[in-house]
Amino acid sequence: VVITPAGAEPTDTDAAVVAASGIAEAVPLGGSAKIITLLVALDANPLTAGEAGDSVPILAADFAAYAEYGRQDVRVLQVSPGDTWTYSDVVRAVALASSNNHADTLARFAFGSVDAYVTAANAWLAEEGYDSVTVADATGLSGDNVGTATDMARLAARAVADPALASVYAGETSGNSARSIPDSSAHLADAGVRGLSRSFTDEAGLCLLFTTSIGEGDDTATVTGAFLRMPDYETLDPAVVGLRDSLAGGIGPVEVIAAGQEYATISAPWGATARAVAAVSKSQSGLDGAA
């Protein structure tokens, strides 16, 4: 999991993972790979939160993908040749409905083809430091999409830091959006958890990327995490809620520096020295005992 204190600006290539357990090696990602499709497409073709964005025509290849994925009985949203979707609605279809045909449409729109997307995405992942992650398609259906839960938690933190995606997950739509998009990613809302991606494949098992808030008042923080290869909901749900509750019990003010504490020595070229001493104490929100 990644913890971001209130008021911090996660820029997210360097989000610090504060807890990890289980398999350390890269494993199949299932539909959680779509968070990469979203991030890479938005990096190449940014979307302003609350705006519709460009028009995305539904081409023959997009309809063919819808028909083929429908035959495979995986998640799809209906499209027809000649349709035009807004960019924001395509993003919503991938983020909320985990629509496989829209993941391909988004990849084609941003990069011209799914193959071109795969090349661009792997280059982006390497450049941004997500060393364990490799993608083979835009949907996550291939078992060759692999990564660690650690890197997927960092990517999830990056997603919730993106204003356009944060707006989507908050349920906001552009003013002229007419598309009703089902929210299949939502999970454990009653426990205060916002699902970012929820999927199952035979190779990846049950996968969940999520975010939640812990703490109260000034001592609040955003927790973002990833569970991969879970066997069933009876195992996943208590693990998510238990993690949230254990972290919520540990968050509080952490003293960064105390009044009167020396924190630097200053030396002049001519040999004079001085000590820098804190005039006031400084605390910030964080996990008890964590620096």
Image: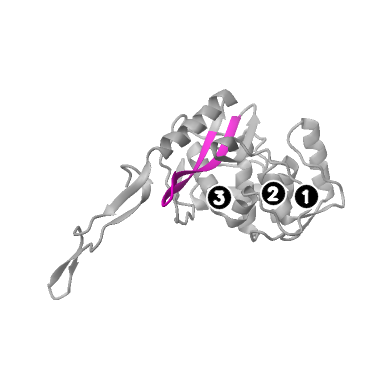
Q: Which amino acid does label 3 sit on?
A: Val
Q: Distance between the residues labelled 2 and 1?
A: 9 Å
Question: What residue sits right under mark 2 in the picture?
Answer: 92
Which labelled disc corresponds to residue 179?
1
Q: Sequence order check: which comes first, mark 1 or mark 3?
A: 3
Which labelled disc corresponds to residue 160?
3
Residue 121 in the image, given as x and y percentages of width and height: 60, 49
Callout 1: SS: loop
Q: What residue type is labelled 1?
A: Arg
Label 3 Cα neighbours within 10 Å, binned few <14 / some 14-19 / many ≥20: many
Label 2 Cα neighbours within 10 Å, binned few <14 / some 14-19 / many ≥20: many
Which labelled disc corresponds to residue 123?
none
Q: Distance between the residues labelled 1 and 3?
A: 22 Å
Label 1 Cα neighbours within 10 Å, binned few <14 / some 14-19 / many ≥20: few
Callout 3: SS: helix
Contact flag, marks 2 and 3 (Cβ < 8 Å): no
Q: Is residue 212 magenta?
A: yes
Q: Is residue 291 above or below residue 187?
A: below
Q: Sequence order check: which comes first, mark 2 or mark 3?
A: 2
Locate residue 87 relative to residue 146 in the image: left or right. Answer: right
Seen from the viewer's position, the closer of residues 134 and 272 is: 272
Q: How far apart are marks 2 and 3 (CA)?
A: 14 Å
